[in-house]
Image (spheres, rainbow, N blue to C red):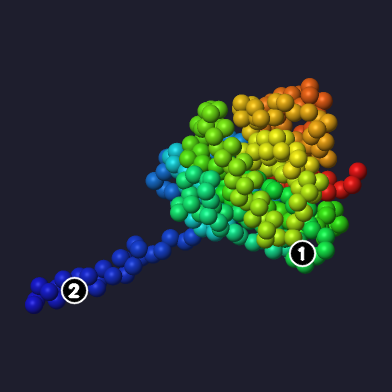
Amino acid sequence: MKNGFLALSLVLSCAPSLAFAQAPVPPVRSVEVNPDHTITFRLREPAATKVEVGVDVLGPALAMQKDDAGVWSVTTPVMQPEIYAYHFAVDGANRVDATNPRIAPNLVGISNLIEVPGDAPEMWDATNVPHGVVHHHTYNTAVVVGRENNQSDYYVYTPPSYDAKAKKPYPVLYLLHGWSDDASGWTSVGQAHLILDNLLAQGKIKPMVVVMPLGYGDMAFVHDHGVWNQPETVEHNVSLFEKALLTEVLPQVEATYKVSRKREDRAIAGLSMGGLESLRIGLSHTDQFAWVGGFSSAVHSLDSLEAIKGLDPKIANLKTLWIACGVDDALITPNRSFIDFLKNKNMPVTQIETPGRHTWSVWRDNLIHFTPLLFVEK
């Protein structure tokens, strides 16, 4: 008993020092937008030997410096008003910012999002205007390979004025996401629904229904970026997606929503992988789509565009063929080559080159400038 009391007394006498030793470490503000529109990133990793932060528009990752408290930090150059994706890398291992709940959904690598606001609301911001509705549909697919229980999905945006009993059906845009995104990419990261709301409120676009389907024919295609070096694998994925879109998604949309079935009222566009798919499907099915757009399209594997090599401009009779790419994107050269291919066939094509890399900041801008061209009589 005596030894027990001595031990208890010893513990109690040490309690203040133990409490001090275990005092909680003050939290670190991981990301902060400064008044001068720079962004400061911080991460507490006292045991790390190297910490970097990758910001989508900046190219190479930024090296961070460690202070005496084990907090690594770096401040970016001045950033334009925009939504940016970023991730940390600790001793070579990518890491999500656990303190920032704003995430960019992705099937390969998750990033966080941070917005640098402008002096006034940007086109991708939620503003005080009428808002459309984004509907999520899950369906049983007989085409898409690798979906659990054969369940695939798509999203549909209906404009604020949408009336299921309207006399005149709405035109429809099929908007395709890029490789590694899921079907929510255009809304969760691209803010497409808010862009459309704002464009409509400003009278810059026609009211339209926008369909955003899952963009894979075979889910195995999304696991490894090396698949893009395998033309047969690219073709396999694109051809299956084409079948899923035309035989499953499109008929379901036309049975569920008040949309036109005329080619003049159908458009298709997409980014990166979705750009390849939109060009392939749109240009090989000009009897179904009169408006075609590609944003930073993955056309470096022209074998996947075999179906359009017999393209005839008179038969195609497109209202708009619009192909855009950022000049700092590795895909700028194949996009220029593809446009040359089209011009050699006397296909009227609008070529757009903007500043920027292979990032959502480019694709949001593309959507802002492409959609006002749609469904307009010339």
> Amino acid under label 2?
Leu
Question: Which residue: 79% across, 37% down?
Answer: 321
User: Measured from the top left, where is residue 104 in percent x and y?
Assistant: 57, 51
Given contact means CB atoms under 8 Å apart, are the residues at marks 2 and 1 in contact? no
Cα distance, mark 2 to mark 1?
74 Å
Whether residue 90 sits left or right of residue 158 in the image: it is left
> Amino acid under label 1?
Tyr
Q: Secondary structure at mark 1?
A: loop
Question: Which residue: 55% across, 42% down?
Answer: 217
Whether residue 282 sits left or right of residue 203 in the image: it is left
Q: Is residue 339 above or below residue 4?
A: above
User: Measured from the top left, where is residue 6 in percent x and y?
Assistant: 14, 73
**12 vs 343, nearest the viewer:** 343
Quarter holding the N terminus?
bottom left
Question: Which residue: 83% across, 60% down?
Answer: 168
User: Circle 1: is it few (<14), some (14-19), or many (20+) Cα within 10 Å?
Assistant: some
**301 vs 15, nearest the viewer:** 301
User: Circle 2: is it few (<14), some (14-19), or many (20+) Cα within 10 Å?
Assistant: few
Q: Secondary structure at mark 2?
A: helix
Question: Which residue: 70% across, 29% down?
Answer: 308
Quarter holding the C terminus?
top right
Residue 91 can be seen, yes or no: yes
Residue 326 can be seen, yes or no: no
Q: Quadrant of residue 353?
A: top right
State the residue lying farthest toward the right.
Answer: 378
Q: Is residue 201 above or below residue 337?
A: below
Q: How many marks?
A: 2
Using the image, tell me which numbered label, if any, was put on residue 8.
2
User: Measured from the top left, where is residue 21 in percent x and y?
Assistant: 34, 62
Using the image, tell me which numbered label, if any, was put on residue 52.
none
Residue denoted by label 1: 162
